[in-house]
Image (cartoon, rainbow, N blue to C red):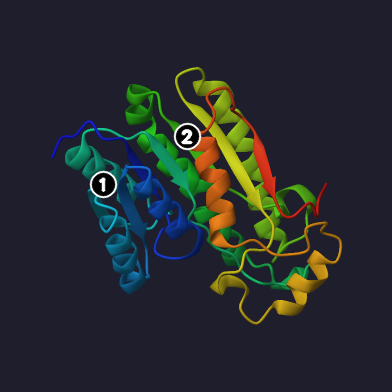
Amino acid sequence: MSTFRKVALVTGSATGVGRACAVRFAKLGYAVVVNYSKSEAEAHETLKLVEAEGVPALLCKATVADAGAVNEMIAATEATFDRLDVLVNNAGTTHFVPHTDLDALTDQVWDDIFKVNVMGTFYCTRAAMPLLKASGGNVVNVTSVAGLTGLGSSIPYCASKAALNCMTQSLARAFGPEVRVNAVAPGPILTRWLEGREAHIAKFLEQAPLGRAASPDDIADAVIYLATGTTLTTGQVLVVDGGRTM
């Protein structure tokens, strides 16, 4: 199916921030590619929410850590919609490990986190770049304030998000003016990731002027702004954490 409707692909859009972004793009009239790796039932729920906005949608199962699967997802996007205007690299993973427990940081932990958070973002961006260049599109990476402060679920997670912040700048320099590349760096978000970690959130928010954690929609606000609300912003990491890290 070919269409002149703009198209957004949101990785990890079965739940949380990814779902909020997918629905928001649908409300703006975009066709949406919904991606998931494991949460199939939730992904179908997101698909229904997108389609309820009266726009075309495509459901793609692919782990972003698998370059071949990513290439197939982008190929399916092109075959279905013949274009791609926005790539939101939202898929991510972590291991919760105390920063003082260095012995727990096995090679497997490092590999798990970097393969998804860093290489997965690279694989998706690499595969999507020809379509984005053709449409004059843009990329929004979902990173974390952990990559700016060194505080987070684990040292490898913080390091992966720091790498992603830097990659955002490198890609923005490399592909401007054709393609803009930006990032959103959230603080704690009220999703299933942080269930049972309310004490951690409360401690973080003690020094946040706005005094609350983000909802998925708060982060979607920033993603939508960078993707659709500005034309002269690139290489930026927009912090959305209630002012905690200023």
Q: Which residue of the protein is positioned furthest toward the bottom in this rendering?
A: 196
Q: Amino acid at mark 2?
A: Thr
Three-letter amino acid code at the position of disc 1: Glu
User: Disc 2 on helix, strand or loop?
Assistant: helix
**Image quarter of the N terminus:** top left
Q: Residues within 10 Å of mark 2 (few under 14, many from 20)?
A: some
Judge left or right: residue 18 versus residue 39.
Answer: right
Which of the two residues, 200 or 64, is positioned nearer the viewer here? 200
Residue depicted at 60% across the width and 29% down the height: 170
Q: Is residue 73 above or below residue 106?
A: above
Residue sitting at x 85%, y 66%: 206
Q: Is residue 230 above or below residue 120?
A: above
| Residue 211 rendering spot, x and y as whole percentages | 78, 63
What is the secondary structure assignment of the residue under circle 1?
helix
Looking at the image, residue 221 sits to the left or right of residue 154; the answer is: left
Task: Examine the rendered structure and indicate whether residue 114 appears above or below residue 102.
Answer: above
Does 235 sit above or below residue 121?
Answer: above
Dot placed on the residue nearer the N-terminal end, 1 or 2: 1
On the image, the x and y values in percent for residue 90 come to: 49, 52
Write down the quadrant of residue 13 in the picture: bottom left
- Marker disc for residue 228: 2
- Give the mark count: 2
Distance (Cα) linking label 1 and label 2: 26 Å
* Residue 210: percent from left, percent from top: 78, 58
Q: Are marks 1 and 2 in contact (CB under 8 Å)?
A: no
Residue at 56% from the left image edge and 69% from the top image edge:
191
Crowd rating for badge 1 (residues with CA inside 10 Å; few <14, some 14–19, many 20+): some
Q: Is residue 139 left or right of residue 74?
A: right
- Residue in the image at 34% along x and 63% along y: 46
Q: What residue would you read off at disc 1?
A: 72
| Percent of width and height locating residue 75 | 24, 41
Q: Residue furthest top?
A: 177
